Image: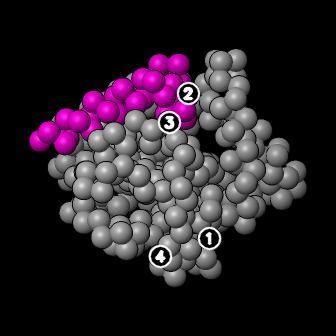
Amino acid sequence: MGTDIEMTVNKLKMSYTDEGPDNAPVIILIHGFPLNKSMWDKQVDVLIENCRVIAYDVRGHGNSDAGTDDFSIELFTNDLIALMDALKIETAMLCGLSMGGYIALNAMIRFPNRFNALILCDTNCVADTPDAAEKRMKSIESIQEKGLEQYAIESLKNLFAPESFVTNKEKIASIKEMIMKTSVQSLSSTLTALSKRKETCTGLASIRIPVLILVGKEDKITSPDTALLMQKSIKGSILKIIEHAGHLSNIENSYEFNSQLITFVSSVKSK
Ligand code: MLT
């Protein structure tokens, strides 16, 4: 894991790592909810051989401050662009998992000239249905009533494939720890932001850069079927299903995930 760097961005203390050769192509990694940049450790290890790799904590997660504004995917995107500006990164490859993918798609549609490749992992382009939004409100109540640990235990059941509970116990423990480190205030604000997010499916046809879509075969939150729908809407995009993985495919099967990621990144770099 790289050294944590802090910088004030959008009047907010943001925490990020910046590794790999200075003059190499840049890739930015955006984590899922309610996790932090350390979920990318296994990808950073391999990407730094050929890329400058930035992994950052979305506001209210990891070591980044929460600030006082209401959370929204648009605000998270504004933070990303402000971070790129502060680091003088004009264009980058962008890789996001789940919530990170929602941010990546929002950024891609609003700031198309800032990105030269997109990796969408275990994510989707639809907005929450009224039922899904209601479930998030119930989660906020339940965190307040039953506490954070119970919420973390319930979340793990959806995040991982059943087999990971046998084969990946240490990884599950580290994800539980990440969830428990997120403040109740940030969890509630992010759940509200996720419930209000706008769809990005109608913007997919306008994407003109190389796109790789990765999804765990047993992802219960953003299924392979929804990944296939995105793939059909993005001209020239590639879809790879990661075996032996649920929603956290980069962690549950980092070997296969990294192999697909590196192949894609190398093909973009050689263009
Ligand atoms: C995530 O992994 O970021 C979340 O599962 C996203 C969501 O709940 O929609």
In the rendered structure, find residue 9 and report the number of the disc placed on it.
Answer: 4
Answer whether residue 268 is visible to the viewer in this image. yes
The residue that label 2 is drawn on is 252
Residue 161 percent coordinates (x, y): 61, 24
Q: Position of residue 99 (x, y in %)?
A: 51, 51
Magenta span has 265? yes
Give the distance between the C-alpha atoms of the residues marked 2 and 3, in whole angstroms.
11 Å
The secondary structure type at the circle numbered 4 is strand
Secondary structure at numbered mark 3: helix
Who's the residue at 35% across and 61% down the image? Answer: 107
Decide: few, some or many residues near mark 4? Use Cα within 10 Å; few <14, some 14-19, many ≥20.
some
Give whichever of discs 2 and 3 has the lower sequence position.
3
The three-letter code of the residue at mark 4 reads Val
Q: Is residue 119 left or right of residue 13?
A: left
119 and 6: which one is in front?
Answer: 6
Q: Magenta stretch: give its range.
A: 243-271
Question: Residue at 52% across / 41% down in the picture?
Answer: 41
Left or right position of 170 against 56: right
In the image, what residue type sits under mark 3? Lys
Q: How is the image coloured?
A: one colour
Q: Is residue 256 left or right of residue 205?
A: right
Q: Circle 1 is placed at which residue position?
A: 65
- Residue under the point 77% across and 46% down: 151
Q: What crowding class fits label 3: few (fewer than 14 Cα within 10 Å), some (14-19), or many (20 or more)?
A: some
CA–CA distance in space, label 2 to label 4? 32 Å
Q: Which residue is mark 3?
A: 42
Q: Are marks 2 and 3 in contact (CB under 8 Å)?
A: no
What is the distance, in whole Å, between disc 1 and disc 3 at their CAs? Answer: 25 Å
The kind of secondary structure element at disc 1 is: loop
Image depth: mark 2 or mark 3 in front: 3
Mark 3 vs mark 4: give the one in front.
3
